[in-house]
Amino acid sequence: MTTDLDSSPQVVVRLDDVHKEYGDAKALDGVRLEIRAGEAVAVMGPSGCGKSTLLSMVAGLDRPTSGTVRVHGQDLGQLNETGLALFRRRHIGMIFQFFNLIDDLPALDNVALAAQLTGTSARQARRRALELLDELGVAGRKDTYPAALSGGERQRVAVARALMNRPALLLADEPTGALDSRSGEQVMDLLIDLNQIGQTLLIVTHDPRLATRCASRLVEIADGRVARESTLESTA
């Protein structure tokens, strides 16, 4: 089927026959996937099935051996490394299992830096960063360094950083994997709230509870292929 969906603003992610090989190993084997604006999609599968590789492709952190990856209308294969980095900063927010905060910057500066890297003035960036930290309930920790934050607080700071540039797409890689159950529930609630106000989400997880609570669609990966897709009813 060759419908012209790429030009539609409703399609935020489109993978078309994406293959990724590392030597003789096939990490992705002909993946086709679409994610529309406002969707929350969870990707699950056993370790080594290709789900992390898929996330890396969508983030522009790795390139397919063949096939095309489009995000927000842009064919990522047409961008060089500098262009990919700039595209990520402007259009993709990323949340990681282990937060990936800069240890020697306080929370406010960790968040503001994301906007400063796209050319926003320090003053404007810090103002928006403080607004986001306030919305996420951690403004009181703005001058605290990551080592002194709880896991839940660090993930909230990481979410604020991911949202700084109002991304078309928010990627979450095991976002509750390093958290205790209470902090994990809070981050799930936060992802649900973001999706309810229109944020498009792509979540990679081993946790079926995270998938069923936060996503409207489940994509199951096996041996580098999409094995099954199903619609989820929220249990939030």
Image (cartoon, helix red, strand yellow):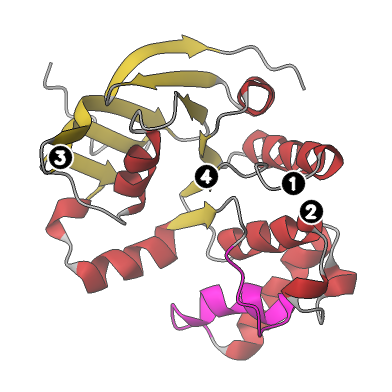
Sequence-earlier tag: 3 or 2: 3
Picture disc at residue 152: 2
- Please tell me which of labels 1 and 3 falls first in the chain: 3
Mark 3, residue position: 21
**CA separation in Å, label 4 and label 2:** 15 Å
Asked if the residues shown at circle 4 and circle 2 are in contact, with their CB atoms under 8 angstroms apart, the answer is no
Highlighted range, magenta: 100-120
Three-letter amino acid code of the residue under disc 3: Glu
| Residue indicated by mark 4 | 173
Q: Is residue 52 above or below residue 33?
A: below
Disc with the residue nearer the chain's start (4 vs 2) = 2
Q: Is residue 142 above or below residue 150?
A: below
Q: Nearer the viewer, residue 15 or 43?
A: 43
Q: Which numbered tag is attached to residue 164?
A: none
Mark whose residue sits in front, 3 or 2: 3
In the image, which is nearer the foreground, mark 4 or mark 1? 1
Q: Position of residue 158 (x, y in %)?
A: 65, 61
Q: Which amino acid lies under the numbered mark 2 shown in the image of this protein?
A: Gly
Q: CA distance from mark 4 to mark 1?
A: 13 Å
Element at label 1: loop
Report the disc number at residue 179.
1
* Residue 19 belongs to magenta span: no
Disc 4 residue type (three-letter)? Asp
Residue type for callout 1: Leu
In the rendered view of the protein, which quadrant contains the C terminus? top right
Q: Nearer the viewer, residue 37 or 236?
A: 236
Q: Is residue 211 visible?
A: yes
Residue at 59 percent of width and 25 percent of height: 215
